[in-house]
């Protein structure tokens, strides 16, 4: 029987320090002082204990673009960021629109073993938005797919979207929509506003997102299905979600750390590291999203971790691929934008980074309370820690972080997956 004693942690940052005894991956005791002869001791004095984080939106690039990320390197980045489960998006090559590809991703994640890797199945064949993919086959596969998304592409046809919602309702699954009316974003390069006009960049209007979210909320309510909105980026979308939830629509939503912190003022130097889909919006949008996350209108934080090769970012703005790294910087950005201003406490952090995403995805053993009998799947965080971001030092193969050289608050000291340390003192387990 393996035994680990976590000494002096503060669960959820509340009350005094306690010891957490873990036996065979399960929390066996939580008390002010625990004695366990022969146990491995992990000194957690001054650290906050939280349930391990769950990311509903990760791009691991395998299969097809292993030059930018692999399931192994992405898992290392996730573990170092406090994550214990990630959902790998379907826009791989080949696309994860069948049981063969999703089972490959799932099995490879199990082989690496640092985080639970859950493949997201494509909604439509080839992400083309025309014909539904093998939703039932993927759901019944060994991977047990319960989240479907064409992320990177909107399911723009309302009839196809309705059919997807009907099928996923029968499967007890959820459609995660990339909300973007494509006819409103042809040639778009940046948020449609003053910054884009000044820089001569084609505008990406907020209504392109908001109109699809409104349509899909109505469809989900009509069908009685569950809808999840990916990477919410505008104040108007938060308003639509508030309206829909008040009427009983089964809709959830995520916001990325970069949409909480950054805005389109970052575009002034034309640095493609700031190019992302959906684009960085205005400062008022970012403020509205922070308020919506605190309120619960936006349910959770998801990274949209999107690694890219240097040649796909170090080029002119129009040719650059959209996306940013996010797994290792997510918690510090949430601390800066939500904890330091008093919008969330540490229990609130657990809600938006662990409990609610696990609930949305239907994960029974993630996002669980820190209590006796529960899996010891934890992140230990130093709330006083600070670190300076260097893209070259991150675990991902790619280095496209918008936070290069930025000092951020909050450090993940250790991550445990069912009692096994997967990251500790800035190093992922080998």
Image (spheres, rainbow, N blue to C red):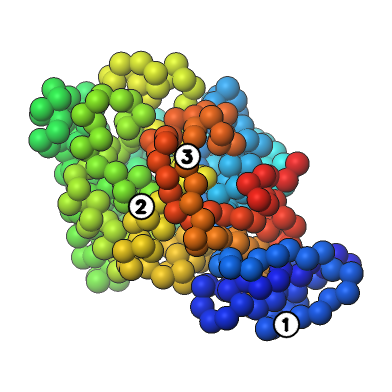
Crowdedness near tag 3: few (<14), some (14–19) or many (≥20) residues, C-alpha within 10 Å: some
Q: Earlier in the sequence, mark 3 or mark 1?
A: 1
Residue tagged 2: 255
Q: Nearer the viewer, mark 1 or mark 2?
A: 1
Tell me the quarter of the picture where residue 191 sits: top left
356 lies left or right of 266: right
Residue shown at the point (85%, 65%) measured from the top left: 2
Q: Quadrant of residue 6?
A: bottom right
Residue 104, horizontal then vertical, whole percent: 67, 36
Residue at numbered disc 3: 389
**Numbered label attached to residue 33:** 1
Instruction: Kindly state the secondary structure of the residue where label 1 is placed.
Output: loop
Pick whichever of labels 1 and 2 is earlier in the sequence.
1
The residue at 31%/64% (across/down) is: 341
Are the residues flagged by discs 2 and 3 in contact, CB closer than 8 Å? no
* Contact flag, marks 1 and 2 (Cβ < 8 Å): no
């Amino acid at each position: 029987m393996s035994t680990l004693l976590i000494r002096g942690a503060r669960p959820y940052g509340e009350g005094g320090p306690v010891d957490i005894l873990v036996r065979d991956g399960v929390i066996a005791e939580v008390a002010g002082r625990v004695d366990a002869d022969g146990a491995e001791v992990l000194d957690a004095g001054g650290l906050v204990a939280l349930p391990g984080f769950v990311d509903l939106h990760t791009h691991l690039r395998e299969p097809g673009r292993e030059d930018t990320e692999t399931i192994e390197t992405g898992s290392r980045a996730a573990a170092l960021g406090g994550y214990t489960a990630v959902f790998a998006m379907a826009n791989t090559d080949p696309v994860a629109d069948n049981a063969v590809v999703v089972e490959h991703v799932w099995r490879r994640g199990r082989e690496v073993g640092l985080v639970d890797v859950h493949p997201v199945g494509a909604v439509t064949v080839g992400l083309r938005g025309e014909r539904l993919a093998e939703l039932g086959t993927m759901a019944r596969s060994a991977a047990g797919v319960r989240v479907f998304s064409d992320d990177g592409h909107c399911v723009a046809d309302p009839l196809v979207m309705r059919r997807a919602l009907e099928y996923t309702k029968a499967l007890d699954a959820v459609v995660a929509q990339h909300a973007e009316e494509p006819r409103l974003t042809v040639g778009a390069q940046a948020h449609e506003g003053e910054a884009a006009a000044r820089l001569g960049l084609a505008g990406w209007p907020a209504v392109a997102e908001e109109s699809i979210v409104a349509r899909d909320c109505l469809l989900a309510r009509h069908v009685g299905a569950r809808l999840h909105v990916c990477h919410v980026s505008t104040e108007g979308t938060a308003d639509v979600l508030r309206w829909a939830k008040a009427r009983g629509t089964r809709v959830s939503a995520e916001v990325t750390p970069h949409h909480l912190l950054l805005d389109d003022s970052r575009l002034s130097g034309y640095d493609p590291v700031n190019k992302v889909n959906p684009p960085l919006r205005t400062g008022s949008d970012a403020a509205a999203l922070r308020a919506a996350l605190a309120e619960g209108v936006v349910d959770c934080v998801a990274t949209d971790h999107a690694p890219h090769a240097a040649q796909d970012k170090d080029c002119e703005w129009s040719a650059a691929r959209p996306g940013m790294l996010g797994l290792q910087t997510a918690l510090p950005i949430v601390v800066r934008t939500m904890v330091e201003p008093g919008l969330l406490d540490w229990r609130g952090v657990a809600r938006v980074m662990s409990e609610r995403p696990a609930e949305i995805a239907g994960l029974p053993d993630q996002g669980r309370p820190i209590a006796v009998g529960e899996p010891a799947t934890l992140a230990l965080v130093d709330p006083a820690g600070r670190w300076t971001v260097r893209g070259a030092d991150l675990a991902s193969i790619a280095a496209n972080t918008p936070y290069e050289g930025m000092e951020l608050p909050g450090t993940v000291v250790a991550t445990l997956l069912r009692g096994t340390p997967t990251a500790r003192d800035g190093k992922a387990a080998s």
